[in-house]
Image: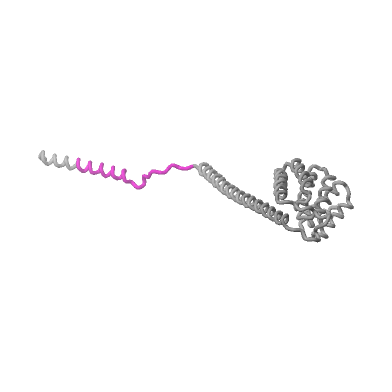
Amino acid sequence: MLSSKYLLAITLSGLLIANQAMANRAEVVEYDPSVRTQPPKVMEADVGMMGYVNDKFNRLEKNSLENSDRLDRLERDLEKFKQLQTRVESLEKQVALLKAAATPSPSESNATAKPVMTAAEVEQSQQAYKKAFDQLMAGKYPEAGKLFKEFVEKYPQSDQIGNAHYWYGETQFVARKYELALVAYTASVESGGPKQADALLKQGESYLELKKQKEAKASFEEVKKRFPDSTAAKQADKLLAGMKK
């Protein structure tokens, strides 16, 4: 017969073994490497939508930067143009004043010579020309035409008379008043100046509008003969080629 102490020892030993087994089992469950937490799956449709949005955003951002750069360049070009225009006007004014102050030679002092403008008249004519030209650049052709007509009547001795006749002709050409335009372009050619080649070309175009082919051809040929390297001569070539078709 086993003693009570021996039975108690056996019982305690069994309990210890059972407790250790339960602990081992818990440790295995807790640290089992096969049991892992999986991250949530992202659907392929979601990935595609995110890529589309990102691509759209990138394109908008790129376009915005390009447009901003273009705007900056345009603003810089406009500022340069304004500065150049101011400088040209200043130089024209100085040249006109110098010419007005110059003493004509004896050979030029005759009854047919144009009267010399005073400094005050030169200043007034410059302001009148600028006012008319500003209206032209603003697209206000009737107003510009009126002002240029007043200019050529009031300042026939101006060094810009040839230009004024040309621009007056342009306002009449736009209004389809080809007879008046032709008279103005012819006056510009006769007055000389930097717009002479263009005036000859527009003279020919006015003849074309008036169905005067012979006169138009003569004007175009005159442009090529007198100003062979000008842009007007190249345009005259095209118009002559069109007349042959």
- Give percent across and percent down for residue 39: 42, 43
Q: Which residue is painted at 70% across and 51% down in the image?
A: 119
Regarding residue 232, the answer to whether it shows in the image is: yes
Residues 147 and 170: in front is 147
Residues 182 and 68: in front is 182
Q: Which residue is painted at 81% across and 55% down in the image?
A: 113
Question: Of helix, strand and loop, which mostly describes the magenta segment?
Answer: helix
Regarding residue 170, the answer to whether it shows in the image is: no
Q: Which residue is painted at 70% across and 56% down in the image?
A: 98
- Give percent across and percent down for residue 213: 88, 51
Residue bounds of the magenta highlight: 15-42
- Give percent across and percent down for residue 135: 71, 43
Residues 88 and 205: in front is 88
| Relative to 81, 43 lies left or right | left
Vertically, is 172 above or below 242? above
Q: Is 31 one of the magenta-colored residues?
A: yes
The colour scheme used to paint the residues is: one colour
* Quadrant the N terminus occupies: top left
* Total numbered labels: 0
Residue at the top extreme, as displayed: 4
- Give percent across and percent down for residue 30: 31, 43
Q: Is 17 one of the magenta-colored residues?
A: yes
Vertically, is 153 above or below 220? above
| Relative to 70, 40 lies left or right | left
